Every structure is written in structure tokens, then in C-alpha cells.
Image (cartoon, coloured by chain):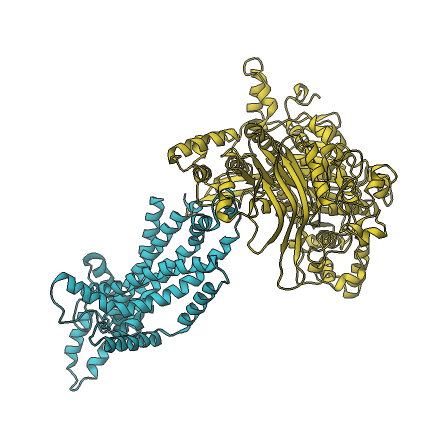
Amino acid sequence: MALYLIRRVINYLILTAVATSLAYLLASVGLNPAQPEQQRHPRPPQIVIDHLLDRWGANPHVPLIERVWVWFSNILFHGDFGISVQNQPVVTLLTTRAGVSLQLLLIGSIIGAILGVVLGVWGAVRQYKPSDQIVTYASFVIYATPVIVMAILLMVLATGFNQAVGTQIITFSGQYSADAPAAFWPQLGDRLVHLLLPTTVLILTSAASYSRYQRNAMLDVLGADYIRTARAKGRTRNSALIRHGVRVALIPMSTFFAYSFGTLVTGSTLLEIIFSWHGMGEQAIQSIQQNDINGVAGATFFVAILILCSSTLSEVLYAALDPRVRR
Amino acid sequence: MRENAGVASVSRVRGRPLLEVRDLSVTFPQRKGGDVRAVRNISYTIAEGELLGIVGESGSGKSVSSLAVMGLLPTNAKIEGEILFDGKSLLTMNDRQLSDIRGKDIAIVFQDPLSALTPVYTIGDQISEALRLHDTALTRRAAEVRAVELLKVVGIPDSERRVKAFPHEFSGGMRQRAMIAMAIANNPRLIIADEPTTALDVTIQAQILEVLEEAKQITGAAVSLITHDLGVVAGHADRVMVMYAGKMVEMGTAEEVFYEPTMPYTVGLLRSVPNVRTASTERLVPLEGRPPSLSDLPVGCPFAVRCPAAIAECLEVEPELLAHGQAQDHLSACHRAGAIANGELARTDIFPRPEAHIDSAVSHGKGETILEVTDLKKSFPLFTGAVVRRKAGAVHAVDGVSFSIAQGRTLALVGESGCGKTTTILELMELTKPEGGRIVLEGTDVATLNKNSRNALRADIQIVFQDPAAAVDPRLPVGDVIAEPLLAQGVSKHDRDDRVTELLELVGLDPAMADRYPHEFSGGQRQRIGIARGLATNPKLLVLDEPVSALDVSIQAGVINLLQDLREKLGLSMIFVAHDLAVVRQIANDVAVMYLGRIVEYGPISDVFDNPRHPYTQALMSAAPIPDPREERSRHRVLLDGDLPSPSEQIDGCRFRTRCPLYKMLDPVRDAAARAKCEQDDPNLRPHDFVEVACHHVDRNKLLVD
């Protein structure tokens, strides 16, 4: 199993390199970093622009293949992802922004997944009862609501709540307040308050979709013969369903968890912009707007690494849940 | 009336009544249409230590009534009546209280051991769970030790290691043993076995029934054995209960029910199943029609429309279950039962044996050879490696098989699943150059065929598949289904329509039905459609892959008779693949017994079956159940150990050696030379009298002296 995993990880690493290089190639062809400089008033002398382009490794006079190689070898041998158009090393950008995004994503998607599974199982066991119907309708309503509508709705509610209480309890702009006391606990509290609204949106949307899938997977298992066997051995219906049913129903979900986590980054871009979080999604959009080749490649790299981690995680999860695929 | 019947059946039972079912009815309410009345007013008792056989076709209510006892029916089922276990009423208990009885006092063994075990837990964990649920003081360690013991009891070798295996690492037979281990874990007082051997091969079926019998001895439990196979209950049951359309229609001792049945359904059922000892000497009696829909039951006796002995009363009043003969607890629900019991109405007159259409000489005389197969080989490569696939070996599914079929004769291929029967016929159907060996169809070596000549020759060899529900396209009207082979042969529309009419008549269906869709037909009728399709191009050779195994017993006979008639009428040659040896004997002239891709015994069927010479054939024959209690009880059985080895396994010498009872009897010292021969020399087919046998020690074979 360990050997198998190592092989898979190497596979994924190669894929990551290919994906990132392709992104760099595409960005180099499609984006023109010189454009903002050329449109300045007064227009800087060409030599200054060329100097900047050289700094970014984007000088069109150098053959594309050579630029790709320089960029690639810098990453490989120096861990250097180049300089962004704001003249910051991309690595620094990546690390700060990744931290911000992960804060938002990890908590939201983990709680969302757990809630989704619990609701799905509960709904399946109580199929067609009023409680199941309510959960079903609620999740479809949430599923159908655009993130931006939900976010603004929550903001309105939070503002209303703040006004009702008389002080600003819920803040929802940025990651932290500049004026929070420096001690550990107040800092943590401040961060959590800022996380509240965006995380709620994330939890609601992911729980809504997970619960539908989980409910279906669980319904498949409900009528299974081995549930009947477990009951014949002396388990009550509910205990048989939880001990024998849930684990089998989780197997198809494990792949779904992992991959939806990988693609969440791109999905949460909107959330970051609405709540003014300076995360990776925002970075990706900005890089494209600013014709930042290195920035685009960096953001792609981050997403690729996330997919790598989540695919590996899905394989580990799958093997942990299902003995039939272990070798 | 009904109460009297219940009391009567209790009185003669020797032991104390353990389970008493009184007036049990189970109804499944439907949103549209009538409610499905799966079980109606049945009453029976099972005494301590007794084995009750419950026989019935699918939909007869036999499983539903047993699941009602366990409290395992779906929540929408409406259950009425009373079920007393050891004096306690089960139907008034809630799930919590029932779960204390389930698995401890009453255990159940289900039909399909593949889906009945949770795939993600080890066998040991699942057995321990059964133990620890009812004995909370038992430690995890102690439960595991006990699980190992239990696996030993049910005959799983190397149980210390196997206890850690997952269900998918077990074969079907081993899974069923594990299920039995689970069932007997807490020394239950009643074991319900719901079709425990239906999914298994005959040799494994014999082993499992033996284990069940042993489990009964060890625990002293009563057993309720549910099956559709009359042969399975014949040898094991003390009493037999026959169910039809949710009703109990006959109940008595095994002897009474098998030798003196008083309900025409039982009479017909017994006359419709072939017996492996006597088959092919008489024609089978088909039961016409099919059971009524449980959501729209007729007013009178549910069997009346299929019953040749029915009188006016039968259509108006549903008969009560009563005693009719001398024995007070031989009960049957029939208005004519009295007349049947006292001999006024002879059983053979109710269901007379039908005459064969024409007894042409074709099947007896040796015609020209239609098909000749020499040294046929087919292997499937095995691969390993996830990134780079490497060939790691091969499964030799068919490994040097030779046989020939003359015109008008039927060859049967028999053997356990995995022996290569189906691969052999699929290789034939390919009509291409085989991996090894030669296939000559009608004098043409198929290796020499080009695309056009292959297509033309395909008209001469056609196939009928096992599952008629899956093998017929549900979106085509049956006329189109039948005409499809003709379409492939480029026959004109007008000729196709004529031929479809002709074929439907030939297989005993109304030609007006050509426009209907397959779902409007019953299983037996659908198989007739499959046969009509097979015959569309007027083939010389018809290949039949388990053509009746998916059908209910009462339907089987009609299809078998049809095949026999067709053979006589059309001078057809057939290859018949089946696992039911009695069915095979009923229809085939010659038989080839296959084991691990080889033929081990080959010859005329009566010679092979009456006097089997290969130890494997002997084991197969003695494992085949016979629907006759006295014969079944007095039989000498040759039981095989273990399962069919994986065909990828390399076995030196004789392939059957690892399971061969004859090889085991050879003395390691005295018969060292004989044993060495088995170990080193792979036996070829050699002639013995009229048959060919692949065994070194045919002359020393004393396995079956009875």
C-alpha cells in the first residue's frame, strides 16, 4: 500500500509540473505584461519597460521555450517562482495568500462535509417523513441560491443583528480588525468573528450538496442484504444502519469529498471578493487582470498542489474504507 | 375449522412446540391497484429439534412468512395473526425486544452469501459481533477465539488465518459456511435457512447441507429449510409444507407429501421435476399457466385455473386446509383431496404424461457429424502493476477440449461454475480461429473463414441464453426480437414476417402476440421467445446456455419438453450447458463432464450417469439431490473437500488430485507408485467400455459400491 501511494504521489507531482508549465505557457502567449507600462502617461522609455520585462522573465525578444526553461529551472533548483508585477516574489505572495484561503476553506468544507453526511444519512433513514422533506427542500433552495445572494443576505441579517444589539458584534469585512487587542485570545476571537459569515456560506452550500449525494448513497445501502443480516444477528434497525450501512455508503463519497475540496479554491473566489479576503482566488483574478504571468502560474501551482493532496487523500480514504481495493 | 387444523398438526409432533404460527397474514399495501397479499392465513408449528421443509415457487410467500417470524419485513408490511416463540408473542414486541431474540434464540441463513455479508468488515469481526451483541461480558479477544472455533466447526480450513479475511476473499461456499457459523454462534433454538444453497454449485450444495445438518446436531436446534428444490428437502426434512400463492396448500411428513400427495399442485410439481436416476425414460409433466397475481387473487382456489382436476366448486370457494386420509396431520387445501386420498382420482390421471410428438429415428441413429472440436484451448492473460501493466500469467479457462456432435444428437457440458463450459461455447460462437486446436463446423474449418462466409455459416449455429429477461431487448416487440437473426442474414421483410408467425407457433405461442413487448410475457414464455429467435435461421446446431435454470420448477418442464419436441421435429443438434444434472439427463444423449478446463469423462449419458467411473463424476452424481425421501436418505455420498481451485493455479499431474477422494484413499506407503502417477502424470481421456475417462485408477475405483 505504501509503495503504491508513493508511486501515485510521484505520478501526481509530474502532473502538477505539467499543469503548471502549461499554465505558464498559456499565460505567456495570452498575456502582455508590458501593456500597463506602455499605457502610462507619460510612457516610460522602452529600456525601462524591457528591464522590467526581463525582471519578470517575460521579454518577448527571448524565445518562449527559453523563457519557460529559465522559469522552470528556477523553480526546480532554487524554489523561485519569479517576481510578480507588484515586484514581490511570487513565493511570498503564495504563502501569505494560501494561508488566508486555507483558513477559510478548511474549516468551512470540513464542517460542511460532516454536516452534509449527517443530514444525508438522517434523511435516508427517515425517507419521505416530514423531517426528510424539510431537509430536502432546504438543501435545494440553498443549492439554487447564488453565493453572492446568500452572502449579501447574511450580511443584511448580521447588520440587523448588530443594530438590534447596539454594538458591532459580527464583523464581516476582511480577515481581522486592525484595532483588536494584541493578546492571543482577543486576536483569536477577532479572527473567528471575521470567519463567521463566509464560513457559514461555505458550510451551507457544501452541506446542501453533500447531503443530497450522501442521502442517495445511503438509500442504496438501506435495502442491502447485509443490513438484514446485521439485524438478524440481533442489532436494532438503527444500530445496523449506523454500524454496517454508513461505512459502505461513505465509500463512493470519499472520492467526491476529495475532488470537490480541490476545486473549492476556484469556487471560493467570489466569496473572497465579497468578504474582502485577500486569498488565492482573489490573487488569481488579479494576476490575470494585471497581465502577471508569474502570478497566474503561481496560482495554478497552488490549485494543482491542492488537487494533488486531495487525490492522495481520496485514495487513502478509499482504501481505509473499502478493503476490496487494498492490495 | 382452521383452529382444528392447527391443533391436529401439533398433536402428532413428538417434541414440544417451539414456534407456533397462527393465522399469519402479510399484506403489502400498494399506492395504486390492489394490495399484495403475500401470505394469507397460514398456521404451522415447528417442534424442538425438528426440520421443517418449506417448498414453493418464487412469490409463494415462503420467504415472507419466515421474515415475519424474524421481524425483518419492511416497515410498510401489514402483519396479522399470531407468532409464538417458546410461548412468547413475537408480533407484539418492538424492534429493541426482538433484537434480543434475533441471533440468540432464532438465527437465519440467507440465500445469497455474497450480498449478505458486510463487505467492509472481516469475517471474524462479523462473527464476533454476533457473539458480543448477546454477551456483553465477552471480551474482544475471547470473541475472536470463539470465532476461530466456529469457523473450524463449519469446516473452513486454516481458520486462524481465514478469520481475518474479508468476505470478497472467500468463495461462495465458504461465505455460506461463515453465515452458518454466525447463525450457530449463540446456540440458537431455531435456525431459519432461506434458500441456503440456491446460489451454489451442486457439490458445494451437498457440503453446505451437510454442515447445516451437523450444526443442527451440535446445537439441537429446530430448522426451517426454505427452498424451491424438492430434492433438497427430500433427504433432510421431517415434515414438508408446500406453499402456493401465499397459502399453505399441503403439509405432512416427507413421506406423505412425496409419496401420497393429496393436493394436485404438489402432484404436478413432483411429476414436473426430472430425477437424475430415471430422467429421459419418461416425459415430464408440464404445469400449464402461471401463479395468480398476488394483488388480484381469484375468488376460489388460486390453483384452480391450472388444475386439471378442478370442478365448479374450486372456482367459487377457496378450500380449507384439512386432513383427508388416515393420517390426521397430513393436511391439504383441496376440494378433491378426499377423492385423491382414497384413490377415486388417480394421481397419474390428474397430470398424465404427455406423448412425444414424433418418435423419429433421427435421435437414435448416428447421423453425419455436425461439429468436431479438437484440442480447443482458450486462456485469459492476467495482468499486474498499476502504472505499467505486465503479464503475470494466464487463466487456462479451456485447456485441450475435444468432442463431436452428430446430427440430431444433444451433447451436454456439465461441471461446476468456473470449469470452462461457458467459455467453450462462446469460443464456438466466435466462429474464428481458436487460440489452440481446431473447430470444424459442417466440414468447414472455421479458421479458414472470411467475413462473408463466416456470416453465412452463422445461420447454422445459434444460441439461447440463460436469463430470458436479460437476453431479450425490452424495447423491441417480440416479432422484431425473433426476426433479428434473419435481418442479419438479409432476409426480406415479407419472408421475415412469415417466418416469425411460423416460429411463434412452433414454440407454442400465439402468432398474434408478435407485436407485444417482452415485459408482457412470463419468464417461461420469454424463454420460448429466446428459443424462437435461436431457431429463426433454421440452424443445424443450437447452443443452449443454462436455458431453464432461471425458470420456476413448474415452468421448466414445459420448456424442456418443447426442446425435446423441437429436436425430434427438426432433427436439431444441440449443445446444452447446465448445472442441473437431472435436467441434463432428461434432454441430452451424450455428456462431457468438465473440470478445470478439461473433459474428465465423456460418453453416452446413460452410461456415464448410471455408472460414473471418474471420481469427479461420482461426486457430482451423488451430490445431485433426488426428489425421493427414501432414496435420498439411503444414498451413499462421495463428498468433495473444498472449492474448485482457481484456474490460474498450477497443479502438476492430475488436476483433480487436490480434491480427489480416490487419491486420498490411496495409501501413501503401499500405493506410493499409484499416488506418484497422479502427482506427475496428467491423465488423458482413455476408453473404458462405452465411455472415455481421464483417470489413472478407474479399475481401483471403489468409491461408489452401494
Report the residue at 42% width, 68% height from top. Answer: A139
- B389 left or right of B307? left
* Closer to us: B346 or A80: B346
Report the residue at 84% width, 43% height from top. Answer: B350
**Tag count:** 0
- A302 left or right of B256? left
Q: Quadrant of residue A14?
A: bottom left
Report the residue at 55% width, 24% height from top. Answer: B680
Q: Position of residue B514 (x, y in %)?
A: 76, 62
- B68 left or right of B476? left
Colour yellow maps to chain: B
Q: Position of residue B585 (x, y in %)?
A: 74, 36
Q: Residue furthest left?
A: A182
Q: Is residue A121 above or below residue A140?
A: above
* Closer to us: B97 or B639: B97
Q: Position of residue A87 (x, y in %)?
A: 16, 71
* Closer to us: B94 or B57: B94
Q: Quadrant of the N terminus of chain A?
A: top left
Colour cyan maps to chain: A
Q: Position of residue B504 (x, y in %)?
A: 79, 57
